[in-house]
Image (spheres, grey):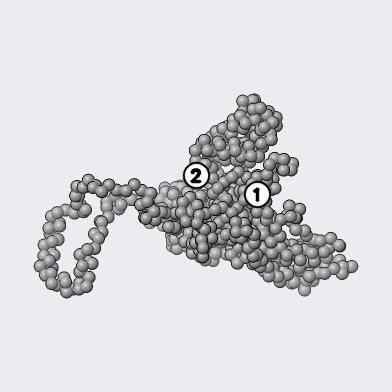
Amino acid sequence: MKTPAKYRSFLPWTSLSPGDISQYRPDDRSGALYLEDERLRFVAEVAIVTQRPLLLRGEPGCGKSSFAPFVARNLNWRYYEQTVTGRTEAKDLLWRFDALERLRDARRVDSTADMSASQYVTPGPLWWAFNRPKALELVSRAIDEGQPRAVEPFSELNRLRDPQRAVVLIDEIDKADPNVPNDLLEVLGTNRFSVEEADLLVSRLVVSPSGPKTSPNQHGALLTVITTNEERDLPAAFLRRCVVHTIAEPDTPAEKNARLVNIALLHMKQLVEARKDGAKMVEQIAAKCLELREDAKRRQRRGPSIAEFLDAVRFCLVRGVGPDHDEWKVVQQSVLLK
Amino acid sequence: MLKDRHHRSAIGLAEALQVCSVLGVREGTEAQWLAECLGFLWKESAAEQEKTQPSISPNPQALPETPTTGVNPNLETKKLKLLDSVGQEPMAFETVFEGHTTKIRNAVEIEPASLARSEERPAFQPLFLDRWFQGIFTAVLGIRVPSQEIDYRKLERYVIQGEFFTQLPLKARTKLVKGVHVLLDRSESMQPFGRDQVELLARLRRMLGGALVQHSWFEYESSAARIIWRTSRPGQFRMETPVLIVTDFGNGSDPLGARTMDWEPWWPIFDQARCSRSRILALIACSPGFWPPGINTFVDCSLVWDRDTSPQTAARLCRT
């Protein structure tokens, strides 16, 4: 087999210009912006080529969850997500069965509707990513009083995207019971699962490579991004099946400062340019933020994250409040240090 | 060259080879990133290291010869004397080691172990085996909570028997949602286990999450039959949160004494746990033969805190 002479990245990495971005929302999942990170880009490519989930570690607010929608937009692949809670079970990522609804329908005297179990099964994000046609077929058949019981999640966002390829975000898996990663092992390894209630076997679609040689569609059709805040250890068997990357801070103070400033400029270019002292204000806030982080580290507390830094910058740029103002203390207490 | 780091896995190696062949990763920064994200350490091969390192000068200054061993020369002479009879019979040597004599004579001398090496402190090993830790504490601390799965057998029974039910019967599943409250004994007899206790606490936090693990330190004076709280006395335990007592119940303070136990100092803890419907669990760093009498009356599940305790043992002993 002819191997390429030198490594070349295939993952596009373009951020939208401020004019293309719709109204700002915090923790936005539009995937509009993400600061260039060579290593993260490479690791995402490894995950796509090896068809293994990408496990992103890092502190809260460092950009783990924002990466998946950004990659999905750049690849033009569909996007699905599920945020895990303490009550989430592995099955919830695959499907949900509404037994209560079924029982209620069964008790209706005048009901002539189809009572089969498949009517009450709702595909989960992994099902949509694995096999969208089967999921669509299921939801189209599950009708209640003329209305579908379920719709495809993020249908508006995914409308113009590749129907065969997908990015799935499973957010904060460490919040779940330790059984959840173990229960996902088989699904992630074999790319199929069985829906017990409806006696259905769902397998991941085989998608042929397409596009030019440099296209990411040549290398894969599914990227599963799993994030963890490392509040709990994940089982070794689960880690072994993942491509693992830690989004870490740079080493030197200068690099840390530059990174914060670049992220702020990327997200708030228009706001920064609207003020004469915008850039200077961002640098001052970045320096202050790093000071607070170091102080918090010494006291063994949690320092401000990137998300909190951006919130503070946004407020300060809009209201003209800098670190040398009296109001800064309130910003510090309510936004940065919690 | 990839060197295994934290998990041995042929799967990881297969992925590495796949990426190398598909993306053309051979060396450099990308190779290092690839190794780390798959759980390996990247190490340059000797040939590549030679390329990067400066070449050695052709006439290096000869280093003074130093003896390779620190053996006493008198001992050496004695040994040689013992071996004299063999040394004088070269033919015997050739005969015995026929075919291997050259190899033996040219063998590289093994350097003797140095004193510094033998003085190194051995690596810390926790009392529970690492690979069993999660299994043990899942069995010990797990609480049966309703899952989202309907228990169809139960439902069927209700329907057949015409029983009235107000909510669907759901299958119970063992989960770690309640966390644990750990009571750690730091009395004199438990001092040798100080580090083990700290490690246990850290490990439990990593397994359950910091928010679900509460802890308190105490000292149990068996002679005075009292418990002294070294951190603030635990208030009410959270409802249904297991209480894990890590102690030897004073066994270490008087190992040769009579096996009697005054449970009175422990009653407040047990009462408090019962009020909050918390299971009482004990980790005891000695064999069951030395456990205090009556322990099974007050403690729901007791485990020996050592490397022989397996998840199966824990599950069997702590079956609810």
Residue underneath mark 2: B228
Badge 2 density bin: few <14, some 14–19, many ≥20, Cα 10 Å: some
- On screen, residue A29 versus residue A151, left or right, reads left
Quadrant into which the N terminus of chain B falls: bottom left
| Type of the residue with mark 1 | Phe
Q: Nearer the viewer, residue A309 or B129?
A: A309
Marks 2, 1 in one chain: no
- Measured in 3D between alpha carbons, the distance from the residue under mark 2 to the one under mark 1, in whole angstroms, is 56 Å
- The amino acid beneath tag 2 is Ile
Q: Which residue is at 12% across, 66% downward?
A: B87
Front position among marks 2 and 1: 1
| Residue drawn at point x = 59 percent, y = 45 percent | A36
The residue located at (13%, 69%) in the rendering is: B90
Comparing B52 with B172, the one in front is B52
B83 sits left or right of A219 in the view: left
Is there any visible trace of residue B168 in the rendered image?
no
Of the 4 image quadrants, the one containing the C terminus of chain B is: bottom right
The quarter of the displayed image where residue A198 is located = bottom right
Helix, strand, or loop for circle 1? helix
User: Residue at the spot x=25%, y=56% of the render?
Assistant: B112
User: Which residue matches tag 1?
Assistant: A70
Q: In which chain is the residue bearing label 2?
A: B
| Left or right for B26, reference A265 | left
Q: How many marks?
A: 2
Q: Which mark is residue B67?
A: none
